[in-house]
Amino acid sequence: MLKNMNEHTIEDVADLGSKLRRRRKELGLTLEAVAKEAGVTTGFISQVERKITSPSLASLTAMADALGAHIADFFDPPPKPEETSRAKMREIYASPGGGFDFERLSTSFDGSTLNGLLVHHPPGFVIAEMVHEGEEFYYVIKGALTMTVDGVRTVLGAGDSIHFDSMRPHSVQNETGETVTVLVVNTMDLFGEDREEGPPHG
Amino acid sequence: MLKNMNEHTIEDVADLGSKLRRRRKELGLTLEAVAKEAGVTTGFISQVERKITSPSLASLTAMADALGAHIADFFDPPPKPEETSRAKMREIYASPGGGFDFERLSTSFDGSTLNGLLVHHPPGFVIAEMVHEGEEFYYVIKGALTMTVDGVRTVLGAGDSIHFDSMRPHSVQNETGETVTVLVVNTMDLFGEDREEGPPHG
DNA sequence: TCATTTTTTTAGTTCTACTGCAATTATCTT
DNA sequence: AAGATAATTGCAGTAGAACTAAAAAAATGA
């Protein structure tokens, strides 16, 4: 069963049992309660929690459901370092397609998903509609930004914010005569572009 | 194999094959290349991608590795709605333990992980050191905030930011004589506190 | 301390995770 | 368009592990 696995992956699966047991204990449930809900035996769950047996995806999904969790929650990788970003020490980058400048605020570490940018949209600039995985959060620091999400156009002023799923078609534009400064925080898209290149920003 | 599963969970597993194939195609890899890397046969991967067979956790992990991805990435649930948050229409909440006020900026939808808050720290206020899952991003809007992460103390001024893994011991304090306003964005902790109560904020 | 509950252990069995190989389809080159 | 090669699917298995049932041990509560 545990054939063809490197050390990293062994750790991932090893965590599974512990996480299942921890979740069960947090909920104050007995093996029997979870077993009954998941449609398996208490002995089996016990073995899974103690890493003696590996559950099939179907069984694991049933167990996750019984624990009010999602299967993906039991496979979180371990995290790491940090970084402070100083306003005065940041580099200002031009966007890959040209048009706006940005400063990168966030750092990255194993398991990190947050991507923070300070974006400066010049007057009249438009980012064409796009769709991709992840979710996004915009907080307008200065000026007024026009966003269109799923065809719904919204003008955000200073202090306003918006949070949406990036799978919904969205576009951004600065319809004012001034540069607009926006803080953008989105989740990393593992299947998206390499982080070392310019950010897609929405 | 697919016994004891409700409709929601069937969808989750059904997505697996499609996601594996999509990822493989994105990388321009053949079944044979992935199979060789993962230590399984091409026929098997083909069956998994077409949902004819469900892989064991060990095999799935090996496949994910071969695809340069993480096993959890293949179980993402589908996302949903959005919300705009207006500065002038937000409610200001007092924190559960008392001491600081905050405004909630983000919304939530299935699969969403971002949690955005605008936090107002009064002079001298301290949030004791804590540790929990997820990651955090702070952007100082007004004033100066002192943060201590893993015993390292840092003072962040307006425009400064910090991004770190919440599993590292961290505390927050306002050592100034003015109220400090900070934008906090962190990832949802499924195993943490219920969102309807006040936010832990760090 | 004792009764009950919970978990672990043990000895299986069944069925599916995965193989090997042939057939089919897709792609590329001329 | 034809032919060669590469890639994928189909098919018939089988070995072993996913999971069971029941007994034993451990944990818990009164």
Image (cartoon, coloured by chain):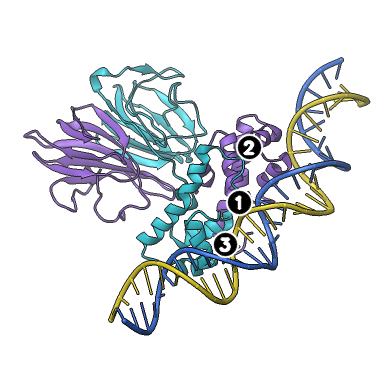
Chain colours: A cyan, B purple, C blue, D yellow
Q: Quadrant of residue A137?
A: top left
Label located before the other in sequence (3 or 1)? 3
Q: Amino acid at mark 1?
A: Ala
Letter of the chain that mark 2 sits on in the rendering = B
Q: Which mark is residue B38?
A: 2
Q: Which residue is mark 3?
A: B5
The answer to whether marks 3 and 1 mark residues whose Cβ atoms lie closer than 8 Å is: no
Residue at the spot 64% in from the left edge and 39% down from the top edge: B21
Residue most toward the left? B177
Q: Amino acid at mark 2?
A: Ala
Seen in the picture, residue A174 relative to A21 is either above or below; the reply is above
User: Label 3's element?
Assistant: loop
Q: Which mark is residue B14?
A: 1
**In the rendered image, is residue A89 in sight?**
yes
Letter of the chain that mark 3 sits on in the rendering = B
Residue at the spot 30% in from the left edge and 32% down from the top edge: B163
Which percent across, then down, holds residue A12? 48, 44
